[in-house]
Amino acid sequence: MSYKTTIGLEIHTELKTKTKMFCDSKNDTEEKNPNVNICPVCMGHPGTLPTINKEAVRKVLKVGVALGADLADFSEFDRKNYFYPDIPKGYQISQYKYPLVKNGLLNGVKITRIHLEEDTAKSSHDTGDYSLVDFNRAGIPLMELVTEPVIHSASEAAEFAKELQLLLRYLGVSDTNMEKGEMRVEANISVSKISPHPTSPLAQSKAGGNLKSKILGTKVEVKNLNSFRAVERAIAYETDRQIAALESGEKIIQETRGWDEGGQKTFSQRLKEESHDYRYFPEPDLPKLKISEIPEFSTENLRKELPELPWEKRERFQKDFGLKDEAVEIYVQNIEMGKFFEIVVKYLEDKEKKDAISLASNYIISDLAGLMKEKNILISEIRISPEMFAKLINMVANGDLSSRATKDVLKIMFEQGGDPEKIVEERGLKQASDDGFMIGIVEEVIKNNSVAVEEFKNGKEKALQFLVGQGMKISKGKANPGALQKLLMNKFITIKR
């Protein structure tokens, strides 16, 4: 029997705002001391009244515009009622019937809705007989994005989450650090049997004409996945668990499960609630929102605020610079490295030629990135300016530096800074290509390698590369290999091969 996995994602993201969602307490994810960024409003004291954080609403609407989604004309907040120590009011202010954003598309995955709510407090359960609750996080603006159940593999789910994280960083709405809980993924997973031969025309009709794709299994939610690896592994494990259960005749129950990172498995937490269990009703202490009556929230004005988006940058880098997909993705993922590369290109003498651009990119991605990784620093912290880096690349492109010397000069620049031309001059690293010096090298190579010379005369092409290598050895790396090869070829131009 074949099975189909169907996945829908719910992704919560803490927004970057100065204050919390419904009060003026500080929104500071870096705060280490517990229960300092709190006030009577976010602690749910009787008689307090919430007010809407306008910037949080703007950020969610910007995400909607970037995704080509529909912005709400009318929206409101609701009370989501449940009792837990991390909810001091006994309810969470969220959105139910009228979210800020509907529809949209990302990575080929349809978006159902994006709404805004307040985050809960943070509970710690590792102290023995009691739990601790830190309310610094309670009330932080939390954006929730819900996808349609149109994802069918663990890798597809992880790729969607990665692209969303990238988009939110480009928009500047969140830092989305998963290790800090600023972005949390929940996956709704169901497994259904694929019937190759529907039993009857009536069954097909009830399934919308396609029994294979319309009938879904029982949905199981896996909560609070805090890494992309956890997303992939939890979905893969849960898929296998459900298939094994179905194979043994067991019935899948609708429930909420957690992910055990140590054991690499999901575990049951509680039966899955339905929406009616939360007894949603409109928040009476907050006004209704008529988005169309707020000019700065219009689609046109929000679109003007959008930066270049990740998919737009991919297309531009491929078109303008002719880079391979792998290189483009590095610059798209690492925004600062992408900026550094673009400035370097502006200083290249031969920037119209793709070879010079490719050369610069290769040295950034491999050599410079390697030095940065070794020292564990960011590109914004290095001592090399884009202008000096471009000067180094210009020297390589002009044949003034060998590959080995370039790596040495780059390391000196990385450790000490400085002008590559001065470093090359002071250390005598300039690659030689003048005829007098090179002809002497060629004559010595021919004199000392008669066997290889004869092999080349007899048509063995690899012998030429051996002779070039010998010339580089004699010159201690100072000879220009291209010029050396050209002179050797000219020496044998009359040889019939």
Image (spheres, rainbow, N blue to C red):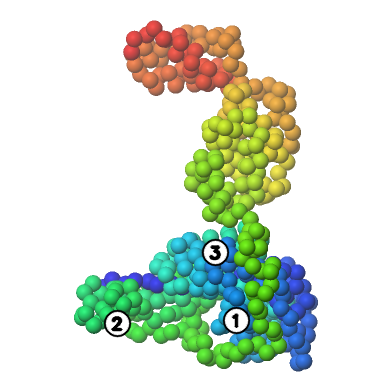
Where does the image place residue 164, in percent across and percent down from the top left?
55, 63
Q: Residue at x 58, y 59 (%)?
A: 166
What secondary structure is found at the residue carrying circle 2?
helix
According to the picture, the residue beneath numbered tag 2 turns out to be 206
Mark 2 and mark 1: Cα distance apart in space: 33 Å
Q: Quadrant of the N terminus?
A: bottom left
Q: Amino acid at mark 3?
A: Leu
Res 279 quadrant in image: bottom right
According to the picture, the residue beneath numbered tag 1 turns out to be 95
Q: Residue at x 44, y 79 (%)?
A: 220
Mark 1 and mark 3: Cα distance apart in space: 20 Å
Q: Amino acid at mark 1?
A: Gln
- Characterize the local packing of mark 3: few (<14), some (14-19) or many (20 or more) Cα atoms within 10 angstroms: many
The disc at residue 128 is: none
Residue 332 visible, this angle: yes
Residue 415 visible, this angle: no
Where does the image place residue 432, in percent across and percent down from the top left?
61, 17
Q: Quadrant of the C terminus?
A: top left
Where does the image place residue 400, in percent across and percent down from the top left?
62, 23
* Among numbered discs 3 and 2, the one appearing first in the sequence: 3
Q: Is residue 31 above or below residue 39?
A: above
Q: Is residue 276 left or right of residue 30?
A: left
Q: Are marks 1 and 3 in contact (CB under 8 Å)?
A: no
What secondary structure is found at the residue carrying circle 3?
loop
* Among numbered discs 2 and 1, the one appearing first in the sequence: 1
Q: Is residue 187 above or below residue 433?
A: below
According to the picture, the residue beneath numbered tag 3 turns out to be 67
Where does the image place residue 288, in percent across and percent down from the top left?
66, 83
Judge by depth and name the residue closer to the eye, 33 or 332.
332
Judge by depth and name the residue closer to the eye, 126 or 255.
255
* Among numbered discs 1 and 3, the one appearing first in the sequence: 3
Q: Are marks 2 and 1 in contact (CB under 8 Å)?
A: no
